Image: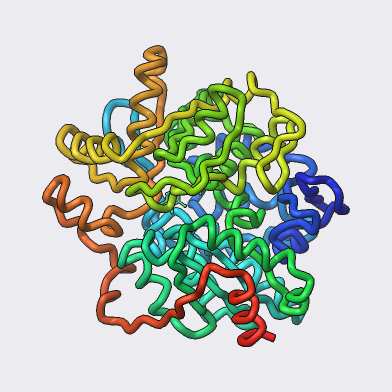
């Protein structure tokens, strides 16, 4: 059985089912697999020929021993990953991987759809009901809401900062109804996340069977390692050890953690470019070795990355031999040299983000949205510093569909990005959401009133 430990190390190890069902560990740490599987050379050689769902099931199998059989994973993945994962060649060996073809047009669909199906299966097998709480800075909420909509035995409450999400992002979560409730807060993402965290720690709510679908849930990370393997295997001779560069637009660092798992399990990666917006606490940490959260987080057009203290950073620190607690205090420093060997930190402000959208379109005819543009700009900066990698295969992640940011893109390049089918008809659907004060007692009262 694959065991999962808490980064705070004061609770016993659990199996994947328990880690999925509880989200955060009882000591407020984050779960990580005790031993990382090793991908065989044979799997790396075969990866290019596998369909995405086949590859996903093969990659996830060793993480799920004792919880899901290979047959169950085959079924979950075939159902979850029924959309394409395009790799677009932009400029020489430099590519954009479009992770925006899922039902909510963001890369969060990869994790959310796996989790929805995995948790649905577990609740069915165990006859246990679940209440999912999630805070969103834009895209998690709709991905989670879609993934859990209509799953029997599961209800979900989504908290979002009403002034930090776009119209379309809001409509994607507020037009579903059913077992999905949405709460609008007149505050920042970090405040939404803090309320959710407090609810998990509150013994009075233990009877509600709360679980998290935020990127702290290990179920969000594992599936996010698959697309790195998919992309590298299609573009490079990974079985022969050819290394690639990835650029990862980052907020809570769940996406990056997926990449680091791929690296640790044997994917040859030269470097991960950690591209943040003006919330540059991690690039600074890489540079100086000192970690300082940004409070309040800075508001940028890549709004899903407006994070002043990434919830997955404790995992990154743990993976590199250090310890960071849930408040961001480092009691044991990670191996900074090793971190710098694997990660290249870049912070890209809004002006450079906008210029990148214009430039990519003008020079290459490539349509980027703000998050993907942060990644693409990060890759350019890496190559300026490391011209020796000009011929290395590089893959920049495009994490949302440009049609989610029509005003910004229209203003910059006078293009109206065509709506993918998943975003069509949103304006016509009726919305329902409740306002909530940024106040824990009010949130607790809401939960007890509706879900006890
Ligand atoms: C969530 C999100 C990100 C950041 O991903 P993390 O895993 O939080 O680092 C980037 N782009 C988009 C579009 C997102 O929705």
Could you tell me which residue is drawn at 40 percent across and 40 percent down? 277
Locate the C terminus by quadrant. Answer: bottom right
Residue 362's x, y, as percent? 15, 36
Looking at the image, is 146 positioned above or below residue 111? below
Could you tell me which residue is drawn at 63 percent across and 19 percent down? 337
Give the tally of numbered discs. 0
Residue 26's x, y, as percent? 79, 59
Could you tell me which residue is drawn at 14 percent across and 52 percent down? 415
Could you tell whether 362 is left or right of 258 in the image? Answer: left
- Most extreme residue toward the top is 388
What colour scheme was applied to this rendering of the protein?
Answer: rainbow
Looking at the image, is 287 positioned above or below residue 257? above
Image-quadrant location for residue 392: top left
**Residue 156 visible at all:** yes
Could you tell whether 369 is left or right of 208 in the image? Answer: left
Residue 363's x, y, as percent? 17, 32
Name the residue nearer the viewer: 29 or 440: 440
**Residue 40 visible at all:** no
Image-quadrant location for residue 393: top left
Name the residue nearer the viewer: 164 or 176: 164
Name the residue nearer the viewer: 346 or 71: 346
Residue 63's x, y, as percent? 71, 50
Looking at the image, is 378 positioned above or below residue 158? above
Could you tell me which residue is drawn at 15 percent across and 50 percent down? 411
């Amino acid at each position: 059985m694959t065991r999962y430990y808490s980064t705070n190390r004061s609770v016993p190890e659990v199996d994947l089912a328990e880690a999925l069902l509880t989200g955060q560990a009882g000591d407020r740490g984050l779960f990580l697999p005790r031993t990382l599987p090793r991908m065989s050379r044979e799997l790396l050689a075969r990866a290019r020929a596998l369909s995405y769902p086949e590859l996903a099931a093969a990659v996830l199998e060793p993480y799920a021993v004792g919880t899901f059989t290979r047959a169950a994973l085959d079924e979950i993945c075939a159902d979850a990953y029924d959309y394409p994962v395009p790799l677009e060649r932009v400029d020489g060996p430099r590519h954009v991987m479009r992770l925006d073809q899922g039902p909510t047009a963001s890369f969060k669909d990869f994790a959310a759809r796996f989790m929805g199906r995995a948790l649905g299966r577990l609740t069915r097998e165990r006859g246990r009901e679940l209440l999912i709480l999630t805070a969103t800075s834009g895209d998690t909420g709709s991905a989670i809401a879609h993934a859990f909509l209509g799953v029997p035995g599961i209800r979900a409450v989504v908290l979002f900062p009403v002034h930090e999400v776009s119209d379309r992002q809001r409509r994607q979560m507020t037009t579903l109804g059913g077992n999905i409730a949405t709460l609008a807060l007149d505050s920042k993402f970090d405040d939404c996340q803090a309320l959710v965290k407090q609810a998990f720690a509150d013994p009075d709510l233990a009877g509600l069977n709360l679980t998290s679908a935020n990127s702290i849930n290990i179920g969000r990370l594992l599936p996010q390692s698959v697309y790195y393997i998919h992309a590298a295997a299609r573009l490079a001779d990974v079985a022969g050890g050819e290394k690639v560069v990835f650029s990862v637009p980052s907020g809570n660092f769940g996406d990056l953690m997926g990449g680091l798992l791929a690296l640790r399990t044997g994917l040859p990666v030269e470097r991960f470019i950690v591209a943040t917006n003006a919330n540059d606490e991690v690039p600074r940490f890489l540079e100086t070795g000192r970690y300082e959260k940004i409070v309040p987080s800075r508001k940028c057009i890549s709004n899903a990355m407006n994070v002043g203290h990434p919830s997955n950073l404790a995992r990154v620190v743990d993976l590199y031999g250090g310890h960071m607690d849930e408040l961001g205090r480092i009691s044991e420093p990670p191996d900074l040299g090793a971190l710098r060997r694997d990660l290249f930190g870049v912070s890209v402000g809004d002006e450079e983000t906008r210029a990148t959208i214009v430039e990519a379109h003008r020079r290459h005819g490539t349509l980027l949205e703000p998050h993907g543009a942060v990644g693409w700009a990060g890759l350019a900066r890496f190559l300026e510093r490391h011209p020796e990698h000009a011929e290395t295969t590089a893959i920049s992640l495009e994490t949302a569909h440009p049609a989610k940011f029509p005003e910004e893109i229209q203003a910059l390049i006078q293009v109206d990005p065509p709506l993918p089918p998943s975003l069509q008809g949103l304006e016509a659907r009726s919305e329902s959401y409740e306002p909530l004060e940024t106040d824990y007692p009010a949130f607790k009262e809401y939960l007890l009133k509706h879900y006890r």
